Amino acid sequence: MIPRYSRPEMTSIWEPANKFRIWFEIEAHACDAQAALGVIPAAAAKAVWEKGQKPYTDERIARIDEIEMETKHDMIAFLTELAEHVGEEARFVHQGMTSSDVLDTCLAVQMTQAADILIENLDELLDALKTRAMETKTMACIGRSHGIHAEPTTMGLKFARFYAEFQRGKARLIAARADIATCAISGAVGTFANVDPRVEEHVAEKLGLTPEPVSTQVIPRDRHAAFFAVLAVIASSMENIATEIRHLQRTEVREAQEYFAPGQKGSSAMPHKRNPILTENLTGMARIVRMAVIPALENVALWHERDISHSSVERMIAPDSTITLNFALKRLTSTVAKLVVYPDNMMEQLNNFGGIHDAQRVLLFLTQNDVSREDAYKIVQRNAMLVWKSFGIDPDNPDSTPELNAIEQGATEHDNRLFYFLSHDDELKKALSVEDLQSLLDEDSIDYHTKRVDVIFKRVFGEG
């Protein structure tokens, strides 16, 4: 991954120095187990630790690369360089093992290290989402379905929804981490013919892994596919928030916007611009993380006990996916924490269209007062359409400006145009008095729509 979207705590996991250190530990722990079983001399295992456990400096890494240029085999190059430090006892290293034992076990360690960082990132994001949810719990805004005004909700419920979604993502990642944390030291084709299973058990314990039940010559790749799929779901949840913020920041909406720092510039050409660049960036990075899913799924089907068609794929998607998601989650957390919200604009948007957000409330009241649902729907819908018409919008003739009759013209003087039209509807007045209608659509309208927010918050956060 390019440095622009990389953070050192995650990139260091995938750097050669960490990889070779893990390779060494796998080999050295295996030597300890082999010595305990009497397969190799105890002195040899001790020599591996004492002479081989040195930092993998640039010089050591360059030497391994130099040897690989000749051998065309990364594991042999590593073992050859290790032997240059250990000396004669190095002949006991890698006893009964195959390259995949080291490579796959190392990958398991690296992926668990990456998962631990990502879980920590999710905890930070969850904290930010909870804080904003509590701050905006009762901050009313219009809810939208299909992008169209529906009924009131609160900004706090938006944050609570995302909090619950990322809680699920964290639970999935914890499960995926456990699934990927397996060790294979089973030798060629995984039969343990040349290495005692107790060696695998010892290495697994030392590295915080569990033995792979059946490893063939590689750890089964369904584990890896599930891991990358979980990263993709988390990335999609990230895009879910990003898309919401991008829509709310549109000029004609402006209910929320990304923090705009002093000195920040929005456009090279248009000085007035404040663009949602962070959430647009997050949308793009979600695509990169999801990109790994199909190759990871295709890695599941390998030939017989082993081939290496998965290897080149994982060398790219493992670092790129985890580095990208790490960077993106940190950016999302900062974006959420600093998000600017505009409650006055939210109320203005909510009240912009003459109270039509209460249409269902009237519909339900009519059905509870001896009006069939079909008739109630017709009554409320035709008056809702008149509300649109009074705003100069004729749904039936979108190319023309509607002409308003006297009653329709009178609606333009009223804040609650839905009430106005309903109160002039003779069919409605047969079922509902104007006084009852007024009571139904009085000033507690928002409270009616948000009266169960506490219930939802208790479900999500375990508190009111």
Image (cartoon, helix red, strand yellow):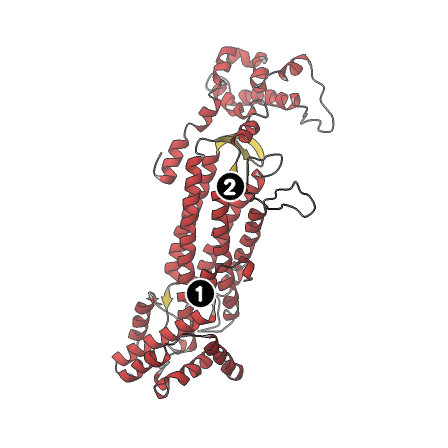
The mark nearer the N terminus, 2 or 1, is 1
Left or right of 212 on screen, residue 309: right
Task: Tell me, for residue 369, which label it has, or none.
Answer: none
Q: CA distance from mark 2 to mark 1?
A: 31 Å
Q: Quadrant of residue 208?
A: bottom left
Query: Marks 2 and 1: CB-CB under 8 Å?
Result: no
Mark 1 surroundings within 10 Å by alpha-carbon count, few (fewer than 14), some (14 through 19), many (20 or more)? some
In the image shown, does 272 or 246 lie closer to the viewer?
272
Q: Which residue is mark 2?
A: 339
Name the residue furthest right.
Answer: 400
- Amino acid carrying mark 1 in the image: Ile
Above-or-below relation of 426 to 233: above
Q: Position of residue 83 (x, y in %)?
A: 40, 84
Q: Residue at point 39% right, 51% down?
A: 171
Q: Which residue is mark 1?
A: 13
Q: Quadrant of the N terminus?
A: bottom right
Q: Secondary structure at mark 1?
A: helix
- Amino acid carrying mark 2 in the image: Leu
Above-or-below relation of 194 to 365: below
Give the number of the mark in front: 2 or 1.
2
In the image shown, does 268 or 110 lie closer to the viewer?
268
Q: Position of residue 300 (x, y in %)?
A: 47, 65
Q: Residue at point 36% right, 59% down?
A: 178
Q: Residue at point 41% right, 81% down?
A: 82
Is any atom of residue 377 visible in this view?
Answer: yes
